Image: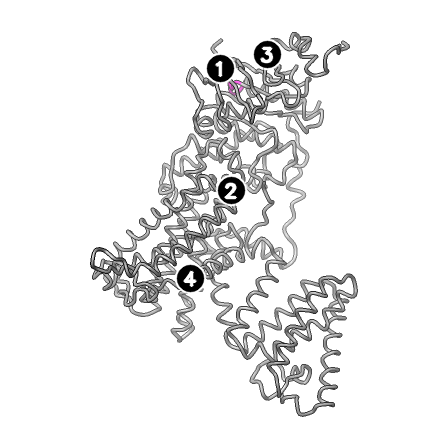
C-alpha cells in the first residue's frame, strides 16, 4: 500500500510551473506579484499629477466624477462582489448620504454643521440605514432580494421628490425640496481648509479612495472577508462552518452603505445641491457596469471600472476621438471575432472592395449626391472618405435606412453558418461605417451611449470575468 | 464512558412522510460510531437535524448534557459539532487554505474595526488561524499541501475536495465530527486511506466521530459500534459483526427471505 497522502502531482508542482511566457504572460506575472499597496501607490501618483497636466476645470470635474464612481464601485463590490448579496438599492445609500449632508449644510433647515462632524455622522447614519434596508437579506437572496432592494432605490427617488409638501396641522413642511431639490449647499471646510475649487475635491476624493481601499483590503484579508466569501459561495455550508450568515450579510450591507454615504456627502458638496434625479436607477446601472466591467470581486477592477465608465463616454462626446474609438472597436471586434489571419484579410479586403465599388457606382450615377471629404474635420485619413460614401443630400434618411439595414443584417448574420457567416460581415461593416459617418457622428449624445454599449458588449464577450477579475465557477 | 452526543426520541417528518421516528442514539466520548442503512433510511436527515439545518418535530439532541435543539447551525458548529456534506460543499472559488481558515470564524473574535486597523491582537489571531489551517491540511499528507494552498478549491479532484471538507470541519475544533459518506467517490486505495485517517483523527485529536458510510469495508475498519437505520427507525445497534449478521439489517438491505453468503 502506498504511503498515506503521497501525491506525485504536488511533489512535482515546482517542475511543472513555468513562468508565463510572452509579453502578456510577463505583464500578468508582474501584476500578480506586485503588492496591491504598490499598485495603489502608482495609481495615486498618476492620479495626483492629473490636475497639473490639464488646465481645464472641466477635465478635473470628470476626474472627480471618475473617483466618485471608483469609490462607489468599491463599496458595491463589498456587498455584491464579496458577500454575493445582490443589492439594487445601493444608489439609495448614495442619495441618502448626499441628502443628509444637504440637511445639515444648507439653508434648508438653517443648519451649517462643521464638515468633519457631518461626514462622520452621515457615514454612521448611512451604515445604520444599510442595517435597516438590509433586513430582507435575512429571508431573501438572489433575484428576490434584488427586487426588494430595487424597490428601496425607487422609493428613495419618490420620497425625495414628494417630501416637500407635508401638511402638519395648518402648516406645510418642506423637507427635501421636492423635484427642485436642495440648492446652495455649503462647500467642505476640513480642518481649517476651505474648499472652493474643484481640484480640492479631487484630492480629497483621492485621499478617501486610498482610505477606503486600504480599509477594505484589510477587511478582505481578515476573518470577516473570508466569511463574506464563504457566504457568497455557499450560505448553508458557511452556516455549518460557524459563520452567522445573517449577521455577516448585514455587515456587508452596512459597509457598502457607509461607503456610498461617504461618496454622497462629497457629491453634494461638489454639486452644491442635491436633486432626486441625481439618484435614479440609471446611476445604479452605471455603478454596476463599472463593477462588472472591472471585474466583480476585484478592488483594482472596481477602481478601473469606475474610471472607464466615467471617462469613456466623455471621450466619446466629441466626434474626432469618438471616430477613432469607433474604428478601433470595429477592428478590435473583428480581430476578437475571427482570430484567424486568412479570414481577417478576406473580410477586410471584401469591405474595402465593397466600399470602393459602391462609391464608384454612386459617384458615377449621381455625382451630385456625394459630399466632399473636406466636409468633415477629422484626423481620420481623408482616404476614408474616398471609400465610404458621404452623402450631401438626405444624409439623415440614408443614415437611418443604413442603420435599420445593419440591424436586419445582424439578425440574418446570427442565422448563418460557416463561410456565409463570415461573408455577411462584409456588408455589415460597410453599413455600420456608412451609418456612422452619415448619421451617428453628428449626434454625439446618442452615439456616446451606443458606442459605449458596443464597447461593453465586446469587452464582456471577450473577458466575462471583467478586466481585472478572476474567473469564477458557478456555485449552486 | 461518558455519553457525549445523545439523541432522545427524535422525530422528523416532511409533509406526512416520517423520515426519523422516535430515534434514540448515544455516542460516547472518544467513540467512532457508524450509521448504516439503505438509501432513504434517514441518515443524512439525522445529520441535518443534529447540525441544526432542520428543526426536529419532537425529541432532544444533547451535546455533553446540554440541548442544542433550536440553536442556529453556526452556534451548534461553534459549540463543538462539525460536519461534512455528502454532496460536496466546499467554497469553490476560495483557495484551499482559505476554505479551512473560514471555519475558524466561530472561535475567533477580531471584528471589522480591528481588521481595518490591523491591531496587534488581530494580526496575532490571523497568524494563529493560518497556522491552524496549515495544521489541519497537513493531516492528509502532501495532498493538500504546498502549492495547493493557493489553488482555488474548484481545481481539486473529487477525492481531494472530500479531504478538504474534513480539514475544514476539523478547523472548527469540534468535539464531535459528523462525516457524511467520507469515502464515496473514492477509489479503493483512497478508501483505505480514509479508513486509516479516521482512526488517526481520533488518536491524534481525540475527536469523537459519527460517520455515515455505505462502504462496508470502511465501516468494518473503523467502527467501535454500528447503528443500522431503516425508514427512520433504529433496527440494530452494536458491534460490526452483530449488526452485519442481524436478520433485520439483511432484510432492510436485501428484502425479506434473503441470506448472505459468508
The local secondary structure at tag 2 comes to helix
**Structure colour scheme:** one colour
Q: Chain of mark 3?
A: B
The local secondary structure at tag 1 comes to strand
Quadrant into which the C terminus of chain A falls: top right
Of residues B130 and A364, the one drawn nearer to the viewer in this rendering: A364
Q: Chain of mark 1?
A: B
Percent from the top left, x then y, of residue B50?
50, 23
Q: CA distance from mark 3 to mark 2?
A: 38 Å
Q: Chain of mark 2?
A: A
Can residue B205 be found in the magenta stretch? Answer: yes
| Callout 3 crowding tier (Cα within 10 Å): few <14, some 14–19, many ≥20 | many
Q: List the residue tagged with mark 3.
A: B225
**Label 1–label 4 contact, CB within 8 A:** no
Q: What's the magenta region?
A: B204-208
The local secondary structure at tag 3 comes to strand
Res A252 label: none
Q: Chain of mark 4?
A: A
Res A67 label: 4
Amino acid at each position: 500500500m502506498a504511503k498515506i497522502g503521497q501525491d506525485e502531482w504536488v511533489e512535482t508542482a515546482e517542475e511543472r510551473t513555468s513562468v508565463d511566457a510572452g509579453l502578456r504572460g510577463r505583464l500578468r506575472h508582474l501584476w500578480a506579484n506586485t503588492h496591491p499597496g504598490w499598485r495603489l501607490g502608482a495609481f495615486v501618483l498618476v492620479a495626483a499629477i492629473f490636475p497639473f497636466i490639464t488646465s481645464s476645470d472641466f477635465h478635473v470635474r470628470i476626474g472627480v466624477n471618475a473617483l466618485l464612481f471608483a469609490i462607489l464601485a468599491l463599496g458595491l463590490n463589498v456587498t455584491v462582489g464579496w458577500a454575493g448579496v445582490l443589492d439594487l438599492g445601493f444608489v439609495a445609500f448614495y442619495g441618502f448620504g448626499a441628502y443628509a449632508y444637504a440637511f445639515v449644510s444648507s439653508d434648508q433647515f438653517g443648519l451649517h454643521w462643521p464638515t468633519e462632524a457631518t461626514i462622520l455622522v452621515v457615514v454612521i447614519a448611512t451604515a445604520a440605514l444599510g442595517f435597516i434596508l438590509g433586513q430582507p437579506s435575512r429571508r431573501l437572496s438572489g433575484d428576490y432580494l434584488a427586487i426588494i432592494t430595487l424597490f428601496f432605490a425607487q422609493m428613495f427617488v419618490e420620497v425625495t421628490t414628494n417630501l416637500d409638501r407635508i401638511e402638519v396641522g395648518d402648516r406645510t413642511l418642506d423637507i427635501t425640496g421636492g423635484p427642485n431639490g436642495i440648492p446652495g449647499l455649503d462647500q467642505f471646510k476640513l480642518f481649517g481648509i476651505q474648499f472652493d475649487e474643484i481640484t480640492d475635491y479631487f484630492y480629497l476624493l483621492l485621499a478617501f479612495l486610498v482610505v477606503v481601499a486600504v480599509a477594505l483590503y484589510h477587511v478582505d484579508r481578515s476573518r470577516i472577508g473570508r466569511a463574506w466569501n464563504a457566504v457568497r459561495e455557499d450560505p448553508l455550508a458557511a452556516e455549518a462552518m460557524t459563520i452567522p450568515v445573517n449577521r455577516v450579510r448585514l455587515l456587508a450591507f452596512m459597509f457598502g452603505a457607509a461607503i456610498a454615504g461617504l461618496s454622497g456627502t462629497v457629491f453634494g458638496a461638489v454639486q452644491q445641491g442635491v436633486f432626486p434625479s441625481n439618484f435614479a436607477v440609471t446611476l445604479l446601472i452605471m455603478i454596476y457596469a463599472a463593477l462588472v466591467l472591472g471585474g466583480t470581486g476585484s478592488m483594482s477592477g472596481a477602481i478601473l471600472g469606475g474610471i472607464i465608465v466615467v471617462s469613456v463616454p466623455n471621450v466619446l462626446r466629441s466626434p474626432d476621438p469618438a471616430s477613432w474609438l469607433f474604428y478601433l472597436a470595429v477592428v478590435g471586434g473583428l480581430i476578437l471575432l475571427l482570430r484567424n489571419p486568412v479570414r481577417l484579410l478576406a473580410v477586410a479586403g471584401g469591405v474595402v472592395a465593397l466600399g470602393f465599388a459602391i462609391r464608384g457606382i454612386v459617384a458615377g450615377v449621381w455625382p451630385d449626391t456625394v459630399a466632399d471629404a473636406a466636409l468633415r474635420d477629422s484626423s481620420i485619413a481623408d482616404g476614408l472618405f474616398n471609400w465610404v460614401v458621404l452623402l450631401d443630400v438626405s444624409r439623415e434618411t440614408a443614415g437611418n435606412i443604413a442603420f435599420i439595414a445593419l440591424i436586419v443584417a445582424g439578425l440574418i448574420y446570427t442565422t448563418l453558418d460557416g463561410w456565409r457567416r463570415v461573408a455577411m460581415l462584409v456588408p455589415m461593416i460597410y453599413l455600420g461605417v456608412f451609418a456612422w459617418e452619415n448619421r451617428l457622428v453628428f449626434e454625439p449624445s446618442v452615439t456616446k451611449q451606443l458606442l459605449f454599449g458596443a464597447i461593453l458588449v465586446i469587452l464582456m464577450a471577450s473577458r466575462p470575468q471583467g478586466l481585472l477579475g478572476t474567473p469564477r465557477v458557478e456555485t449552486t | 464512558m461518558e455519553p457525549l452526543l445523545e439523541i432522545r426520541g427524535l422525530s422528523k417528518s416532511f409533509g406526512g412522510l416520517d423520515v426519523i421516528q422516535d430515534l434514540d442514539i448515544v455516542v460516547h466520548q472518544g467513540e467512532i460510531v457508524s450509521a448504516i442503512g439503505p438509501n432513504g433510511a434517514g441518515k443524512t436527515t439525522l445529520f441535518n437535524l443534529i447540525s441544526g439545518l432542520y428543526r426536529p418535530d419532537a425529541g432532544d439532541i444533547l451535546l455533553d448534557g446540554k440541548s442544542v435543539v433550536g440553536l442556529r447551525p453556526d452556534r451548534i458548529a461553534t459549540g463543538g459539532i462539525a460536519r461534512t456534506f455528502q454532496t460536496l460543499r466546499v467554497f469553490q472559488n476560495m483557495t484551499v487554505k482559505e476554505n479551512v481558515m473560514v471555519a475558524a470564524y466561530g472561535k475567533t473574535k477580531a471584528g471589522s474595526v480591528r481588521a481595518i486597523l490591523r491591531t496587534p491582537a488581530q494580526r496575532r489571531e490571523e497568524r494563529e488561524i493560518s497556522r491552524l489551517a496549515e495544521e489541519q491540511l497537513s493531516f492528509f499528507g502532501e495532498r493538500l499541501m504546498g502549492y495547493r494552498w493557493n489553488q482555488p478549491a474548484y481545481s481539486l479532484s473529487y477525492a481531494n475536495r472530500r479531504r478538504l471538507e474534513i480539514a475544514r470541519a476539523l478547523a472548527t475544533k469540534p468535539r464531535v465530527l459528523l462525516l457524511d459518506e467520507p469515502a464515496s467517490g473514492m477509489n479503493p486505495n483512497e478508501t483505505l486511506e480514509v479508513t486509516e485517517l479516521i482512526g488517526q483523527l481520533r488518536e491524534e485529536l481525540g475527536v469523537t466521530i459519527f460517520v455515515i458510510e455505505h462502504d462496508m469495508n470502511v465501516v468494518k475498519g473503523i467502527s467501535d459500534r454500528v447503528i443500522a437505520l431503516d425508514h427512520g427507525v433504529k433496527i440494530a445497534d452494536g458491534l460490526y459483526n452483530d449488526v452485519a449478521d442481524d436478520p433485520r439489517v439483511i432484510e432492510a438491505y436485501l428484502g425479506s427471505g434473503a441470506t448472505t453468503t459468508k
